[in-house]
């Protein structure tokens, strides 16, 4: 069965620190990959997505993610975090055909200290 | 673009009553909508996939008779929690996938259900 694991459940950083959140998935076929962010009290927003092509994907708010097929990974990065990045981050994977349903990771709660 | 709304945003009901939650895609057509449940400090758990004009596909362990899903049009799906009990209290989130569009889901703001 497909699964998505996010290794870091809670991350605390100071402003301007660099961020990397891990995401690994288990699925042998072709996948689409996503990172969503959920700010406190708000709904899920798409940060970035990978369908094909350049494995380094740039998203909104200075975030980027790199798809490494051989490692089944899609880690999220940001060179310098801000207090406003405090949120929960979810990695999601879906097949490229069929039901297109997402499999979500457990989420990483990021707290950025001012 | 790609806005999804949910109504109501929160609801409190008595045990044994039924509650209907609406999910609308406001500026696009969605042949497929998804219903999730999110427990506090946990990830989203897919409950069912809703396809316009056909029966919903439920995930394993989700009671289809308790969580009725109707996807009557390309912009509206409803989730009815029947005979609600306190253990049904949760945050219910829908998402919609654009018809013929890229494989991307757009999420609604969620509905907080509290069953007394």
Image (tube, coloured by chain):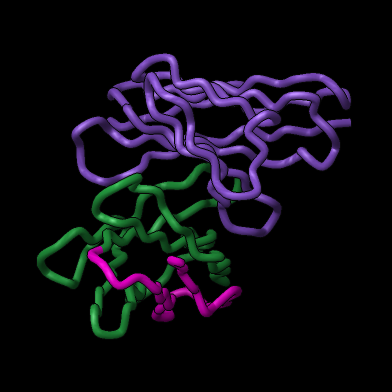
Q: Quadrant of residue B29?
A: top left
Q: Is residue A34 magenta?
A: no
Residue closer to the observer: B56 or B106: B56
Residue B80, above or below A13 = above
Q: Residue furthest top?
A: B72
Residue B72, above or below B37 = above
Chain letter for the part of the structure drawn in green:
A
Residue A104 at x, y = what percent? 48, 59
Hue used for the chain lettered B:
purple
> What residue span does the magenta drawing correspond to?
A1-30
Q: Residue furthest left?
A: A53
Q: Quadrant of residue B16?
A: top right
Tell me: B44 left or right of B26: right
**Residue at horizontal 64 percent and vertical 43 percent from the top:** B62
Residue B52 at x, y = what percent? 37, 23
**Residue at horizontal 38 percent and vertical 39 percent from the top:** B106
């Amino acid at each position: 069965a497909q699964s998505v694991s996010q290794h870091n459940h809670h991350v605390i950083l100071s402003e301007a620190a660099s961020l990397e959140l891990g995401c690994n998935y288990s699925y042998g076929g072709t996948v689409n990959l996503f990172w969503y962010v959920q700010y406190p009290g708000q709904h899920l927003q798409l940060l970035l997505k990978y369908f094909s092509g350049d494995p380094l994907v740039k998203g909104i708010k200075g975030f980027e993610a790199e798809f490494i097929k051989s490692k089944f990974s899609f880690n999220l990065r940001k060179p310098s975090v801000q207090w406003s990045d405090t949120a929960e981050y979810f990695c999601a994977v879906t097949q490229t055909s069929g039901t297109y349903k997402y499999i979500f990771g457990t989420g990483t709660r990021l707290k950025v200290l001012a | 673009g790609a806005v999804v709304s949910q109504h109501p945003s929160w609801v409190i009901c008595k045990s044994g009553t039924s509650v209907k939650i609406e999910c609308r895609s406001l500026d696009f057509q969605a042949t497929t909508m998804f219903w999730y449940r999110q427990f506090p400090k946990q990830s989203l758990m897919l409950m069912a996939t809703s396809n316009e004009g056909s029966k919903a596909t439920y995930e394993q362990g989700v009671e289809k008779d308790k969580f009725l899903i109707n996807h009557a049009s390309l912009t509206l799906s409803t989730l009815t929690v029947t005979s609600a009990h306190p253990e049904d209290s949760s945050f219910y989130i829908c998402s919609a996938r654009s018809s013929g569009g890229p494989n991307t889901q757009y999420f609604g703001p969620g509905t907080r259900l509290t069953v007394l």
